[in-house]
Amino acid sequence: MTEIVFEFLGKIGFTHPVHPAFTHIPMGMVIGAVIFRLASFLPRLKKLAITGYHCVILALIGVGPTILTGYLDWQHRYGGNWEFLIVLKMILAAVLTVLLLITAFKDDPENRGLDRRTGFYLLMALVSVGLGYSGGELMFG
């Protein structure tokens, strides 16, 4: 199946890895969510917590296709070899997905505070940095 996808893409002139194009949705939304959440603690900007929550939902929607394309690229480019950075990315992707789900179901952006829920936003940012760093190491060494 993987080779069918990449053969088709090659026929239309797309020879690059597919996964990096999809990573911008969850990664960008997570960073946006954190920025909006933190900005919402300024008195006149408290409604930005809702915007941050919406970023979490969009990141959650984008995480599935990102993981799928990561799997496809791993199979195509690395032959499914278990390298440390691949395993790390799989673990971090699972952790990010769980944090996004917890935040999506437990957060109340109308009543935000410096509490555990805000801590989940910060954890999501740290996990995203780890995912980006390990992906960069894989691609650019």
Image: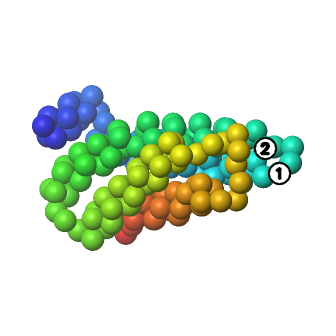
Residue 135 visible in rendering: no
Q: Are marks 2 and 1 in contact (CB under 8 Å)?
A: yes
- The N terminus is located in which quarter? top left
- Of residue 17 and residue 108, the one placed in the foreground of this image is 108
Q: Secondary structure at mark 1?
A: loop
Image coords of residue 27 (percent x, y): 50, 49
- Of residue 70 and residue 55, the one placed in the foreground of this image is 55
Image coords of residue 6 (percent x, y): 20, 38
The kind of residue on which mark 1 rests is Leu
At horizontal 47% and vertical 61% (from top left) the residue drawn is 127
48 above or below 98? above
What residue is shown with label 2? 46
Compared across the picture, whether 128 is left or right of 18 comes to right
What residue is shown with label 1? 42
Compared across the picture, whether 86 is left or right of 47 comes to left
Image coords of residue 57 (percent x, y): 52, 38
How many numbered discs sit on the rendered protein?
Answer: 2
- Of residue 131 and residue 123, the one placed in the foreground of this image is 123
At horizontal 16% and vertical 41% (from top left) the residue drawn is 2
At horizontal 23% and vertical 53% (from top left) the residue drawn is 74
Image coords of residue 113 (percent x, y): 71, 54
For the residues marked 2 and 1, what is the alpha-carbon distance in whole angstroms? 6 Å
Q: Where, by quadrant of the figure, is residue 79 drawn?
A: bottom left
At horizontal 33% and vertical 46% (from top left) the residue drawn is 67
